[in-house]
Image (spheres, rainbow, N blue to C red):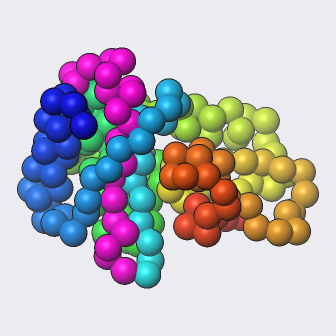
Amino acid sequence: MNELQAKMESKMYELLWQYELNHWTVSWFGGFKVWGMCCWSKRGISKRQIQLNYQLLELHGEERFYDTLLHELAHALDYESRGRSDHGIKWKLWAEKVGAIPEQYDIKTKQEGALEAVKQKYQYKCETCGKLIGPTRIWKREKSCGDCCRANGGGFQERFKLVLQ
Ligand SMILES: [Zn+2]
Ligand SMILES: [Zn+2]
């Protein structure tokens, strides 16, 4: 981990502790698409984790990246208060409270808007990153979110299962 990463990681922990989310951990991933992720597992508190993209941090610098910390913090608070999170009104209230800019988030939300605009017949959602997929028929077997799985070692992963809305 380089100096900048270490600095952002301790800032993230500071924010988590400030909001009494001491059981959350921080980790890093790469790629040029997703800025950050908020991950959880219903099976225990050990899996609650904020994941941050070190490549986008390098590319855009700490000032621009800082909003990602606040964005993911809002997801963590949202999740703690109701057992799930997305980019809906409840998350937006947390985002406002912690000072995140709700409009400045990741590519996933743009995809969400685009999918809604073409009105897919069915809609599946990744509860982790909020990505929506709109197939024309119900899937016969479970699928997981490609983005989240790739960022976490690949393969089908139950925790990133796409859920029919
Ligand atoms: Zn988000
Ligand atoms: Zn996902």
Question: As rendered, which of 135 and 28 lies closer to the eye?
Answer: 28
Question: As rendered, which of 134 and 140 lies closer to the eye?
Answer: 140
Q: Position of residue 62 (x, y in %)?
A: 22, 24
Q: Position of residue 12 (x, y in %)?
A: 19, 46
Main secondary structure found in the magenta portion:
helix
Q: Is residue 15 visible?
A: no
Q: Position of residue 128 (x, y in %)?
A: 50, 56
Q: Is residue 82 above or below residue 16?
A: below
Identified at 32% across, 50% down, the residue is 27
Inspect the magenta stretch and tell me whether residue 151 lies in it.
no
Inspect the magenta stretch and tell me whether residue 45 lies in it.
yes
Question: As rendered, which of 19 and 39 lies closer to the eye?
Answer: 39
67 horizontally vs 37: left or right: left
Residue 117 falls in image quadrant: top right
45 horizontally vs 125: left or right: left
Q: Is residue 80 above or below residue 93?
A: below
In the picture, the quarter occupied by the N terminus is top left
Residues in magenta, as a range: 44-63
Q: Position of residue 41 (x, y in %)?
A: 44, 72
In the picture, the quarter occupied by the C terminus is bottom right
Residue lying at the far bottom of the rendered structure: 43
Identified at 52% across, 46% down, the residue is 151
Q: Is residue 153 visible?
A: yes
